[in-house]
Amino acid sequence: MGQQQLLLVILVTIIIGIATVVALNTFGSTLDNAAVRAVQVDLINLGEASQAYFERAKLMGGGGRTFNDIDFSKFTFPGNIDEDDNLIAYNENGTYTIIPVDANQFIIEAEVNDSESRMIAIRICSRSIALGDVDFGTAPTPPPCP
């Protein structure tokens, strides 16, 4: 009888260990997906703020229908702007970099603060925004302006 009880205790311990590992992996992937979603929300909010800046007259602190001088100091960003380079900003969700394209559009690339350092980019145009795919290493180029 003692040998059966010992085997039962070992079996239960193994099952509990496997369940714990599965739960931790599920929790970790859920956190990573939430981090990606948070960065996507930040990028869309930055896109909307950028379009408002584009439309606002230069006398009112806007771009006067151009993105020529765009950087993170031109609109409200929920985080910190790099002291040496206004084209780089960061918050708890990720690190964001503005890449100027032309007077009517620019791209913001973001590195997600997750366990996999995923990248995502958004193209901000004068009349639209286009969110790109999520990838590892480098951000895929977002779709062009319509």
Image (cartoon, helix red, strand yellow):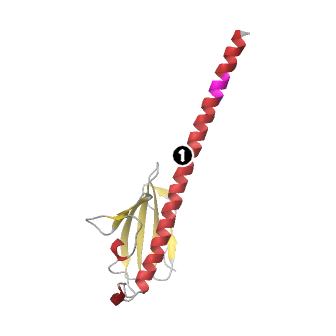
**In the figure, 34 relative to 42: above or below?**
above
Amino acid type, mark 1: Gly
Which residue is depicted at the point 67% across and 23% down? 11
Query: Image quadrant of residue 22?
Result: top right
Q: Main secondary structure of the magenta part?
A: helix
Magenta-tinted stretch: 11-15
Q: Residue furthest right?
A: 1
In the shown orientation, is residue 34 left or right of residue 11? left
Quadrant for the N terminus in the image: top right
Q: Secondary structure at mark 1?
A: helix
Quick check: is 109 in the magenta stretch?
Answer: no
Q: Nearer the viewer, residue 146 or 62?
A: 62
| Residue 78 position within the rendered picture, expressed as x and y whole percent measured from the top left | 42, 66
Q: Looking at the image, is 29 positioned above or below residue 4? A: below
Label 1 Cα crowd, 10 Å radius (few <14 / some 14-19 / many 20+): some
Name the side, left or right, on which 67 lies relative to 11.
left
* Residue 14 falls inside the magenta stretch: yes
Camera sees residue 78: yes
Front residue of this view, candidates 99 and 65:
65
Q: Position of residue 91 (x, y in %)?
A: 40, 60
Task: Residue 67: give x, y in percent of width and height.
Answer: 37, 81
Residue linked to disc 1: 28
Q: Residue at x 46, y 51 (%)?
A: 114
Work out whether residue 52 or residue 100 is closer to the camera in this orientation and state it.
52
Residue 54 falls in which quadrant of the image? bottom left
- Which quadrant of the view contains residue 52? bottom left
**Residue under the image location 45 percent in, 80 percent down:** 51
The total of numbered circles placed on residues is: 1
Residue 142 visible to an observer of this rendering: no
- 122 lies above or below 11: below
Q: Position of residue 24 (x, y in %)?
A: 56, 40
